[in-house]
Structure formats: C-alpha cells, structure tokens
Amino acid sequence: MSGALSRFRVMAYVVGVGLLGLVFAMLVKYLGDNPGMMAVVGPVHGFLYAVYLVAAVDLALKGRWSLKGTALVLVAGTIPFVSFYAERKVVDSVRAGKSL
C-alpha cells in the first residue's frame, strides 16, 4: 500500500503543477493570442492526468475506497489547487487506516 500511496502523492503534485501550467498556457493562448505554449502543455498535462487517474484508482482499490471517495479524488485533478488538498486528505486518511 505504501508504494501505491507514494505513486499517488507524486502524481497528485505533478498534476497539480501541470494544471497550473495549463491554466497559464491557456491565458497565453487566449489573452496573448499565442497558441504555441498550449500545443505543448495541453497534451503533456492530458497524459500526466491519465497517469494520475491510474495511480488514484490503484490506491482506491488497495484502500477499498467508496465509489464516491474515489470519484472525488479523480475529479480533484481537474480543478486548480484541489489536487494538493486532496493529496493531503488522502495521505492523512490512508495513514490513519481509514477508507475514503
């Protein structure tokens, strides 16, 4: 379980930072009329989010999370800053031996 938790933690931070980069790239694209950055950051973030989903589902299966808890953690990677909060809550819950 500790391996799954470590993978999830890393991916939660990577996706959180990547999502902030994506928001910045979107601002550059739409406010600066320069789509170049978005063409790179968008697909990279999409791939990393898919890896985050796999890591979260792996941890959810090993931790026997509820469907609702799993869905909330999966959605957390789509809202800026929420993946950082979700990561902290998941770590606290797993270390306390609780299920989401």
Image (spheres, rainbow, N blue to C red):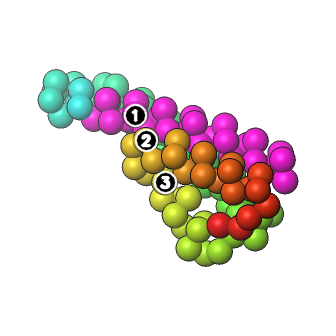
Magenta segment includes 20: yes
The residue segment tinted magenta is: 1-26
Front residue of 49 and 10: 10
Circle 2 — which element?
A: loop
Could you say where residue 51 lies in the image, as x and y percent from the top left?
63, 47
Picture coordinates of residue 18 (x, y %)?
A: 47, 34
For marks 1 and 3, give the CA distance: 13 Å
Which of discs 1 and 2 lies nearer the camera? The answer is: 2
Horizontal side, residue 66 vs residue 43: left or right: right
* Mark 1 or mark 2, earlier in chain: 1
Residue visible at 60% across and 45% down? 88
Which residue carries the number 2 mark? Answer: 81
Look at 31% across and 25% down and name the residue there: 36
Residue that carries the numbered disc 3 in the rendered image: 76
**Amino acid type of the residue that numbered disc 2 sits on in the rendered structure:** Phe
In-front residue for pair 59/91: 91
Q: Position of residue 24 (x, y in %)?
A: 31, 29
Q: Earlier in the sequence, mark 1 or mark 3?
A: 1
Residue type indicated by callout 1: Leu
Q: Which mark is residue 93?
A: none
The first of marks 2 and 3 along the sequence is 3
Looking at the image, is 35 positioned above or below residue 7?
above
What residue did someone put label 1 on? 20
Q: Contact (CB < 8 A) between labels 1 and 3?
A: no
Is residue 14 in the magenta section?
yes
Q: Amino acid at mark 3?
A: Ala
- Measured in 3D between alpha carbons, the distance from the residue under mark 1 to the one under mark 2, in whole angstroms, is 8 Å
Name the residue rendered at 40%, 49% in the picture: 79
Q: Are marks 1 and 2 in contact (CB under 8 Å)?
A: yes
